Image (cartoon, rainbow, N blue to C red):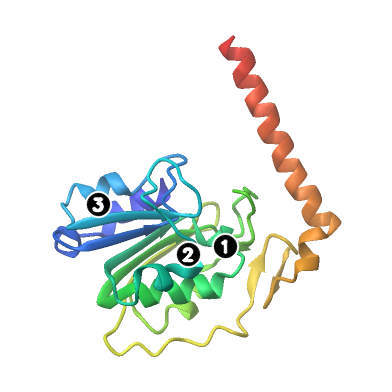
Amino acid sequence: MQGFIFGLKYLTREEIENKRILEVGSFDVNGSIRLLIETYKPAEYIGADIVAGPGVDVICDVTRLAEKFGEKSFDMVVATELLEHVKDWRRAIHNIKAVCVPNGVILITTRSPGFVYHGYPYDFWRYELQDMQWIFQDCRIENLESDPAKGVFIKCVKPADLRETDLISYALYSMVTATKIVKLEERNLYSWYFRARVLKQRFKEFLHKMIEKILGS
């Protein structure tokens, strides 16, 4: 829903009409930006995600977009509430930039440290305003907003002469370790801290389903 609101504020008809649009992480869980964008009549709208479901046209991992679609394939690339769930966030960012045409639009919304753990199936990262400023310093940032309780939202334009920022040593806040880290190790996923966090969320989901079942009976 945050992606829809941010897109409503800053996306224009000229940026969408008769253009090729790719939405990454398009599985519709609680509302989609697709409805908004399709009102402006794009030439093509492709929703991609790692599993089939509502809003998904093509099954594809965000870290393999360029391999699947080819570089410079879309006039706009959208990812709402996706990046926090991608273990290899650097490769995801690289692929998003790669499939966007020169002077094309990239719109991303993701979660900040104040947002609770929510695994689908896992929840790895949190992004802050300064993170997006650094990650997309190689693009022209047009709109950048943050809300500690909800997330960080960015709209930028890929330059014709993109010189991609080196992100190899950049540290992000990880929900797995509760610290800023450069690289997430496999052993981190088996820590008692992270396992307890995952189990706590799954227990909450189980209780929620049971309550819904009881109230619906």
The location of residue 182, given as percent across then percent down, is 67, 78
Which residue is depicted at the point 85% across and 55% down?
Answer: 192
Secondary structure found at label 2: helix
**Residue matched to label 2:** 62
Say left or right for 215 vs 161.
right
Secondary structure found at label 1: loop
Q: Which of the numbered marks, if any, corresponds to residue 86?
A: 1
Q: Amino acid at mark 3?
A: Ile
Q: Residues within 10 Å of mark 3 (few under 14, many from 20)?
A: many
Q: Residues within 10 Å of mark 2 (few under 14, many from 20)?
A: many
Disc 2 versus disc 3: nearer the observer: 2
Which residue is depicted at the point 75% across and 64% down?
Answer: 177
- In depth, the one of 217 and 47 nearer the eye is 47
The location of residue 196, given as percent across then percent down, is 81, 48
**Residue matched to label 3:** 37
The location of residue 44, given as percent across then percent down, is 22, 57
Quarter of the image that includes the N terminus: top left
Say left or right for 137 vs 170.
left
**CB under 8 Å between callouts 2 and 1?**
yes
